[in-house]
Amino acid sequence: MVRKLTAAAALATLTVSCAPPTQSPMKVRALVLSSNGEYAPTEVELKTITDIVAMEGTVLKMVGGAHIRLDSQDPEANAAKDEEAYLRALLKDAGRPVTASYNTDTAGVLWPADFHTWNLVTTYYNLERAWEYFTTIAEVKQADLPQTTAYYFPEFVLADTSDDPLVDNAIFFSPVKSFLVLPFKAIEKAPLALNASILTHEYAHLVFNRRVYRGSGIPAPIQQWGGVGGSTPGLNVLKSLDEGLADFHAYVASCQTSFGCNTRVLSTSFEGQLVEDRDLSKNWCMSKELYTQLYGGNFNTTFSGREYQVGTMLASALYKASTSAADRQVLARALVAAYADTDPLKPGLYELTRMYLDNQSEFTLSKAARAIVRHIPRGNVTLKNAVCTNLVTHLQIPVTELTGDEDSCPESTTTTSACPSIYTP
Ligand SMILES: [Zn+2]
């Protein structure tokens, strides 16, 4: 039986049952994708929540009613002297705490009492799972992933494009160092905040930001490499890595869910070609045309959108190389370790972007791929070989650019027949 209760009454009930409202874990129902592919109200535990009404805990702090505006003509933003001032300039209204309300069943499990509470609880649950994946499976230190703000249903305007607030999206927006869970409008399938794979992908952008960009809201390589009119090869590679690795992490994390390993990050929220184009289980091959665009295109114009194509190719190569849970875990850790590493024998992506800040054409897919390979432990011979084979085959990275030292690919690495060579005329 489910009794109707206000939030205050729910807290009173909890107090009576000797479970203080601030104590985690908290048993609550969320909308979770079941093994048959349908979203169902499922009993889950929020392990990190400290305030179930304001939806705040170790992982997230939900904030409602914010107004965020990005406008290249904004005098306040343009006058900002540092990232904090810039963040404040974008945040036209900093918003206020949300108020979730619940019914409680006889077993003491909280049931969201309204649409927004279902959405808030499920968002918190999905991002908490993502945080747990990164801090346990991928071994990111908890101290590196402190509480992040999630603006819930903010008014979010990209004024250079339109004055209409954006809808139907859930994103990590680095200028305000926060997640934005935007209102729904046209989306006919599962809203993005309910989609665990999409939220894990977005959480992966936060992790990439914290490690590869040292948490910067306006990362130096993005600013410097993107500020040119011609080709932006370094930026194209960097953005492709960010997207592809986010999809791979979302895939690995999905293997822990009741639905199981999901190679299609966008499924249940989108359908058709969009979903197929990001399916890691398909055979993706670097083409001459995409290779030319990667190194000759401009990120803001001709290359725009193609970071997903290159990213999917990378994620798919990693997917094909890691077929067991143990290998997936080793690879997930290797990726995160490759984000930043001060060891001069195996510099991480952060170190590489610093090294080539003034010459982005040196930041190539080969160098980034080598950083990844070098972070796969030497003892994992089969995995390392498989990653090497898939990288040289699907991304068409020349073998010589991935070999040459003990931590890199073995000299015996060769391509397979899965993809045609882009180097033969
Ligand atoms: Zn993304």
Image: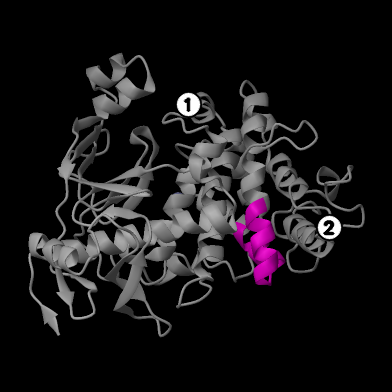
Q: Residue at x 45, y 36 (%)?
A: 300
Foreground mark, 1 or 2? 2
**Residue 304 visible in the picture:** no
According to the image, label 2 marks what residue?
A: 379
Look at label 1 and name its amino acid: Gln
Q: Which residues are magenta?
A: 315-333
Q: In the figure, is residue 394 to the left or right of 167?
A: right
Q: Nearer the viewer, residue 34 or 22?
A: 22
Quick one: 18 or 312, which is closer to the camera?
A: 18
**Against 106, is 80 above or below?**
above
Total numbered labels placed on residues in the image: 2
In the image, 287 versus 137, the foreground residue is: 137
Query: Going by the picture, which residue comes out furthest to the right?
Result: 412
Element type where label 2 sits in the image = loop
Quarter occupied by residue 271: bottom left
Q: Which kind of residue does numbered mark 2 sit on?
A: Gly
Q: Position of residue 333 (x, y in %)?
A: 64, 53
Q: Residue at x 43, y 61 (%)?
A: 129
**Residue 32 placement, left or right of 155:** right
Residue 183: x and y, percent?
A: 20, 55
Model colouring: one colour
Where residue 223 is drawn, which disc sits there?
A: 1
